Every structure is written in structure tokens, then in C-alpha cells.
Amino acid sequence: MNGILLLYKQKGPTSFETIEKLKKKFNLKKVGHCGTLDPLAEGLLITLINNATKINNFVNYEKEYEIEVKFGFATETDDMEGEIIKKTTVPANLQNSIKEIIPSFIGEIEQIPPRYASIKIQGKKLYEISRQGKTIDIKPRKVFIKSIDIINCTNDTARLKVICRTGAYMRALARDLGEKLSSAATLFYLKRTRIGKFTINESFLIDNISNLKENLISINDALYEMTPVFLDDDSYKKVKNGASIGNNSKTYTGFCKLIYNDEVIAIGQIFGNTIEIKRGI
């Protein structure tokens, strides 16, 4: 039983705790996920079941979020879990102020990850370093934000819809919006509503799943953007041995899914007329 499951992660548990609950309920061998949601966040969590854990690095679809950013204070974690470290005035006419600065956050931008993040620096997770009271220089990372739309605003809170690529932190975006307006801001609420073509409306609460298999999406369908290459018996044997094969597709660059008997058996990378095996499934 291999494939992906669209889970609805609720507020409270970590992403790891969520998939561990699923693993225990259905006695699964391997479970992973695509894109961590913080404990206070909720929404769509793509869960990888058994052999589907091997496609983790290839499910890099754009993500859509609904977030609430509260202005007037900053916290050490850039969300509501941390202690308040700064208080400021709230920008006047918040909606218009945000409209004016949105263009500077669109496209490829540099973003400094929150100090309490799971990324590794010098071999350690950043949040572990921060919890030890140590300070470390965090270099900006290039991220891509496709769009930011204002859903509504109150005197001190903006509700936004954000579409971005993998790697962008909504906590950092909230913090940076505040700083751009010479104020301070923190992420008050986050819901992930879409990853690629998969939406929150298709997701399941773990407690509501009785038959896991009937709710799984195949590895082939999970990799819907990837070029399919269909193998004959000879090519299949070469792929299973990790050998390169000829390219019979009409695509001459990028990754591809190698299919035999209607199942994805490997991920390849196309180099002109040759396909090199990158990951067996």
C-alpha cells in the first residue's frame, strides 16, 4: 500500500505527531510528509505512505495559505507561541499601508528564516540553537512569492491570501511586513489551503478515516507535473539495476517518472537522449 494521503492537520499537534498518529492507527511501516506546519497552524498536510516517502524531494508544488498578521508587537518566535519582545504603534490606515508595500514582497525576494525554525545550520536545527540561548548569524535565503491578496483588515490585523513556492516562511513574511511599515507584526493565524492541485477540501481528519487504501492517491497521480516515460521489459531491467536508458519521450530536460505496468518504479533525470536514474521507488 503506497501513495499519498491528503490530511487535515489540526491546531495543536506538530506535523510529526500528526503523521505518527496515522502510522500507529494503520500500523504503517513508513510515513512522511511534504512541508511542515507549525503546531499553531492548520490545514493541508500531504502525507507520504510507505514507498511514497521516496518522492518527498520531488513534490515541490506551489503552496497557498490564508494568514492573519497582527500589528503592534513582535515575538521571539514570530508567532503567538513566543514571548513578546517589542511593542509598537499600529500603522495608520492599515489596509492602504499594506497595499502600498505588497509589490516589494512579490517575486524572488530574500528572506531571513525565523530563529525558531526546523532548518539546519552547522548541523543543528535552528530552533535547538535558539532554545539554548545562543545567537547565530542567519543568512537570508531566496524565496519566491507569487501573490499576496488582502482578504480583509481591522484596525490592527490583516487577513491575507499568499501563494508561494516551497521554502517561504509565513512567520518571516509577517515579521517583515511589520518592519517594512516601521512597526512590528507577528503571525496570528495560518491555514494551508492548497499544495499544487491538491486542496484542503479534499483532505481528511485522521479520526474520520476508516479505510486508508481507498483514500490514497497513487504515486503516479501525485507526480502529475512530471513527464511520464513508459518502459518496456528491457528498459525495466536496466532501471532496476540503476543503469541509464534511452529517452523515448518528447522532453529533453528535467525530471521524469519511469512507469512499468502502470506503476512508477523510479524517478529519472533527462539529459537529451539519455535518462539517468535519480531515485528508485
Image (spheres, rainbow, N blue to C red):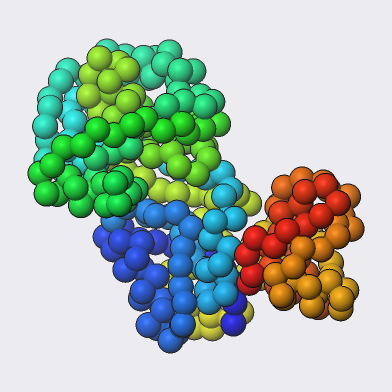
Residue 203: tell me if it is visible.
Answer: no
Question: Where 147 falls versus 13 (above or below)?
Answer: above
Residue 2 image position (x, y, % from top left) = 59, 77
* The residue positioned farthest toward the bottom in the image shown: 27
From the viewer's side, name the closer residue of 133 and 181. 133
Q: Is residue 158 left or right of residue 277?
A: left
Residue 216 image position (x, y, % from top left) = 59, 73
Q: Quadrant of residue 95?
A: top left
From the viewer's side, name the closer residue of 271 and 114. 271
Residue 60: tell me if it is visible.
Answer: yes
Residue 220 image position (x, y, % from top left) = 70, 66
Q: Is residue 59 left or right of residue 183?
A: right
Q: Residue at x 45, y 18 (%)?
A: 104
Quarter in which the N terminus is drawn: bottom right
Q: Residue at x 54, y 25 (%)?
A: 107
Question: Where 23 falls versus 205 (above or below)?
Answer: below
Question: Where 81 falls versus 181 (above or below)?
Answer: below
Q: Residue at x 43, y 86 (%)?
A: 27
Q: Total label count? A: 0
Q: Is residue 91 left or right of residue 6?
A: left
Q: Quadrant of residue 178?
A: top left
Quarter in which the C terminus is drawn: bottom right
Q: Residue at x 42, y 27 (%)?
A: 110
Residue 258 image position (x, y, % from top left) = 76, 65
